[in-house]
């Protein structure tokens, strides 16, 4: 596969469940991002990793836990979520040469918390 | 705090009817302004980067321009396949290199 892939594409979970979102990029980029996209709201940056090191945590609640084992893979571990966490979660990557503004997004995981 | 406001929220055009989308921004210093396109069920797709006032970029029927306070995305003779949500984002100088502040987007519908 090429580009940025995300699995699963859809996820329904209860408030007490634990689940993980996976992102993989096949572009050779070093920076990877997690965003949250809610209806009628702008894209919100959650976490950034550059060369596997976390460089941004945008005041995200601890029920969201990111993991970046290498520059190609990014995970978002979810536990004890709230219904207001229901949203589209987007992963992105970017090459350093672009100044980190040109980002390549995956298709997203549509998360529903019951 | 960096802010991005896009207008209109939604725009409906007939095929061939040219128009413009607006992105006004407030940022302490601008490193770059970015336009993205998002189709339903997909992630945003990068279109343009603008760095300084007076700069213009073109791609097919789209042209992006930048002033010190706003950017315009001009759509010339649009086609139905141009229907999408267009997102504007700014990257501030002096802040995190990684952080983009996005607007809520303009939903463009082009009718045949």
Image (cartoon, coloured by chain):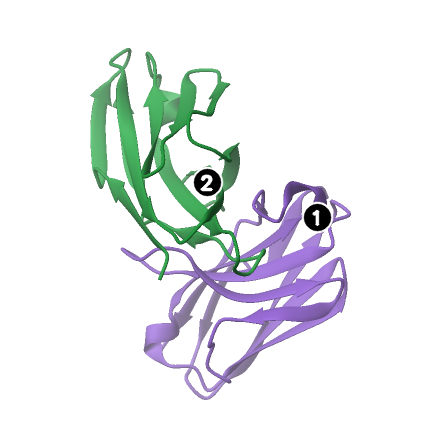
Q: Nearer the viewer, residue A8 or B62?
A: B62
In which quadrant is the C terminus of chain A drawn? bottom left
Q: Quadrant of residue A24?
A: bottom right
Q: Is residue B40 visible?
A: no
Residue hosting label 1: A96
Subunit ID for the residue under disc 1: A
Q: Which mark is residue B105?
A: none
In which quadrant is the N terminus of chain A drawn? top right
Residue A73, position as x, y percentages in the image: 72, 62
Give the structural element (helix, strand or loop) at label 2: strand
Residue hosting label 2: B33
Subunit ID for the residue under disc 2: B
Identify which residue is drawn at 60% across, 56% down. A6
B30 vs A60: above or below: above
Q: Which chain is purple?
A: A
Q: Which chain is green?
A: B
Identify which residue is drawn at 46% across, 77% down. A59
């Amino acid at each position: 596969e090429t580009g940025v892939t995300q699995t699963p594409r859809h996820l329904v979970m209860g408030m007490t469940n634990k689940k993980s979102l996976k992102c993989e990029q096949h572009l050779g980029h070093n920076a990877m991002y997690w965003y949250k996209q809610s209806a009628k709201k702008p894209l919100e940056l959650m976490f950034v990793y550059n060369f596997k090191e976390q460089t941004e945590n945008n005041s995200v609640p601890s029920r969201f836990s990111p993991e970046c084992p290498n520059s190609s893979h990014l995970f978002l571990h979810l536990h004890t979520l709230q219904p207001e966490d229901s949203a589209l979660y987007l992963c992105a990557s970017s090459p350093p040469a672009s100044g980190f503004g040109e980002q390549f997004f995956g298709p997203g995981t549509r998360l529903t918390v019951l | 705090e960096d802010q991005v406001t896009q207008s209109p929220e939604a725009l409906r055009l007939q095929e061939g009817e040219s128009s413009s989308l607006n992105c006004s921004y407030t940022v302490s210093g601008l490193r770059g302004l970015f336009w993205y396109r998002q189709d339903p069920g997909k992630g945003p797709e990068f279109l343009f980067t603008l760095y300084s006032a007076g700069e213009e970029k073109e791609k097919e029927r789209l042209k992006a321009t930048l002033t010190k306070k706003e950017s315009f995305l001009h759509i010339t003779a649009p086609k139905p396949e141009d229907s999408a949500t267009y997102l504007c984002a700014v990257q501030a100088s002096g802040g995190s290199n990684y952080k983009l502040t996005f607007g809520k987007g303009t939903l463009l519908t082009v009718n045949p």
